[in-house]
Image (cartoon, rainbow, N blue to C red):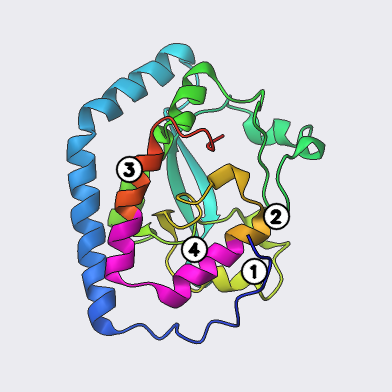
């Protein structure tokens, strides 16, 4: 992908109709998603607890949302309970560029965690973030506070909109895409976003979700 920078976003003034329709789609989609996956949510929760009875089922992590606002993002726990502490020992093994950490064979990931991360099932609790309004179904992925500390003004543009559960990055290669290309895709989405574009990304997500070789 070209490393050409997207110009400073000038189309951030969203129309009220788009904002309203997007929120209606988010709430409807999150409710339907929770209902459809309710049995799976229970099974995964049981499997996580069975493998590691002492650890929590849901992992709450501080993330940065729209306009730099901090919120708690929910995921099924896929790592050992002291994963953040062990991260310091693994930073030099980072397999992606820029302000992100990705490691294909991360020793902190549990057996159940490998499966739910591979299929993105670990992301399902984020339906509740969508209901709360912290996230949208579609948008840039919310970064960690430590990642944002390394952002320049160009990178910070991806924080101009509500972050999402899926987006152009997830449907374009995920972990095989470097940080700069991820930002490029996020800003492309921000400049072109529409209800139709959101719907297309959601449908494309279904095709790349399960068994994706790019997720780790």
Q: Which residue is mark 2?
A: 99
Mark with earlier residue (4, 1): 4
Quarter of the rendering containing residue 133? bottom left
Dot 3, how many residues are within 10 Å of its Cα: few (below 14), some (14-19), or many (20+)? few
Q: Marks 1 and 3, Cα distance to the nearest angstrom?
A: 28 Å
Determine the secondary structure under disc 2: loop
User: How many numbered discs, if any?
Assistant: 4
Q: Marks 2 and 4, Cα distance to the nearest angstrom?
A: 16 Å
Q: Nearer the viewer, mark 1 or mark 3?
A: 3
- Residue drawn at the location 76% of the way across and 33% of the way down: 90
Pointers 2 and 1 in contact (C-beta within 8 Å): yes
Residue 153, x across and y down, in percent: 68, 76
Q: Which residue is mark 1?
A: 155
Magenta span contains residue 113:
no
Dot 4, how many residues are within 10 Å of its Cα: few (below 14), some (14-19), or many (20+)? many
Please give the label number shown on residue 206. Answer: 3
Read off the magenta span.
183-201
């Amino acid at each position: 992908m070209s490393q050409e920078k997207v110009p400073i976003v000038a189309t951030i003034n969203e129309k009220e109709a788009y904002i309203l329709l997007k929120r209606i789609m988010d709430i409807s989609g999150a409710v339907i998603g929770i209902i459809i996956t309710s049995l799976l949510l229970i099974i995964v929760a049981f499997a996580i607890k069975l493998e590691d009875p002492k650890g929590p089922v849901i992992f709450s992590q501080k993330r940065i949302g729209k306009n730099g606002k901090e919120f708690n993002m929910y995921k099924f726990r896929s790592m050992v309970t002291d994963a953040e502490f062990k991260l310091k020992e693994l930073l030099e093994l980072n397999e992606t560029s820029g302000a992100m950490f990705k490691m294909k064979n991360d020793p902190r990931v549990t057996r159940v965690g490998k499966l739910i991360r591979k299929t993105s099932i670990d992301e399902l609790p984020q339906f509740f973030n969508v209901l709360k309004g912290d996230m949208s179904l579609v948008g840039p992925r919310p970064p960690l506070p430590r990642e944002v500390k390394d952002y320049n003004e160009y990178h910070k543009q991806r924080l101009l909109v509500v972050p999402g559960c899926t987006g152009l990055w997830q449907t374009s290669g995920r972990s095989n895409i470097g940080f700069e290309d991820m930002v490029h895709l996020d800003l492309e989405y921000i400049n072109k976003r529409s209800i139709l574009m959101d719907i297309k990304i959601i449908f494309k997500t279904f095709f790349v979700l399960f068994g994706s070789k790019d997720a780790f």
